[in-house]
Amino acid sequence: MSATATATSFDRPVVRRRRWLRWLAWFGIAVFVLFVFYLAIAVPWMNRWGATDAEVAAQLPGDELVPVASAITNRAVTVNATPEQLYPWIVQLGVDRGGMYSVLFVENLMGLHVTNADTIHPEWQNLAVGDFVRFTPKEYALNPGPGLWVREMDAPNTLVACFGLETINPEPCTMTWQFVLTPQEDGSTRLLLRGRTAASGNGFLDAAGQVVTGPVFIMEQRMLETLKERAESLAAQQ
């Protein structure tokens, strides 16, 4: 075997390694660019999807529950129905009630066996302050599961709740869901869902929390759109 052939054979692994490192470097750069885009552009857009500047700046019922927030989301839709026609759909939220009106495939992939109601049920309209809205069935394997503790209700305009566990009603509140229904002159309703997450005192943890914005946005966006569809469909029949 010649010296040239030996050198060539020896160089092949080195060339492959360099090529692999080069592709790895480009992959790392691409991931970094996408991550920066996600945090700098996508997250701010998702955090105020559908909301106007006035709605984002407004003081809303429930803001006082989390006075210092590390993250605030405002997501809104216009519903061609009155607050009185929309509010009952929100009141019957819950996996053991009217459903969560979100992405059924994802919910049932988690074994929640959710069914979204397509009409208003009188037996689910008795929600009151202090009640727990379940995100998991009573017999769910991973219980005690998460859900919402109702803190404020002012029908048909406001429903405010804090996230917690079935066995833990957090005090003070660490994360809110604030449904605010504002009637419009044309008979429609602006449905705004605000979420406030309390600052943890750890800047890194607060920033890391932004990573889950995408999945949460998808679920909340679908919920708002389904509430809109349900309320408009029933209102059109009345």
Image: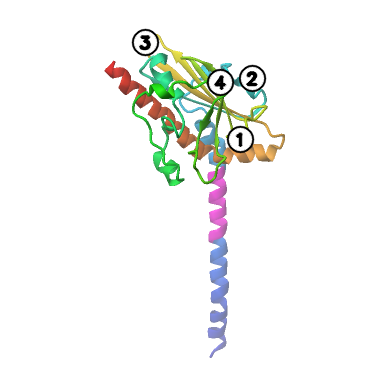
Disc 3 to disc 4, how far (Cα)?
31 Å
Magenta stretch, main secondary structure class: helix
Q: Residue at x 49, y 42 (%)?
A: 139
**In this figure, which colouring scheme has been used for the structure?**
rainbow
- The spot of residue 67 in percent (x, y) is 66, 22
Disc 3 to disc 1, how far (Cα)?
44 Å
Mark toward the start of the polypeptide (2 vs 3): 2
Of the 4 image quadrants, the one containing the C terminus is top left
Residue 114, relative to residue 152: is it above or below?
A: below
Q: Which residues are magenta?
A: 23-35
Residue identified by numbered label 3: 186
Determine contact: label 1, label 4, CB under 8 Å: no
For label 1, the crowd category at 10 Å Cα-Cα, with few meaning under 14, some 14 to 19 and many 20 or more, is few
Q: Which of labels 4 and 2 is toward the front?
A: 4
- The spot of residue 47 in percent (x, y) is 53, 30
Q: What kind of residue is marked 3?
A: Asp
The numbered dot on residue 167 is 1
Determine contact: label 3, label 4, CB under 8 Å: no
Q: What kind of residue is marked 1?
A: Thr
Q: What kind of residue is marked 2?
A: Glu
Residue identified by numbered label 2: 64
- The spot of residue 155 in percent (x, y) is 48, 14
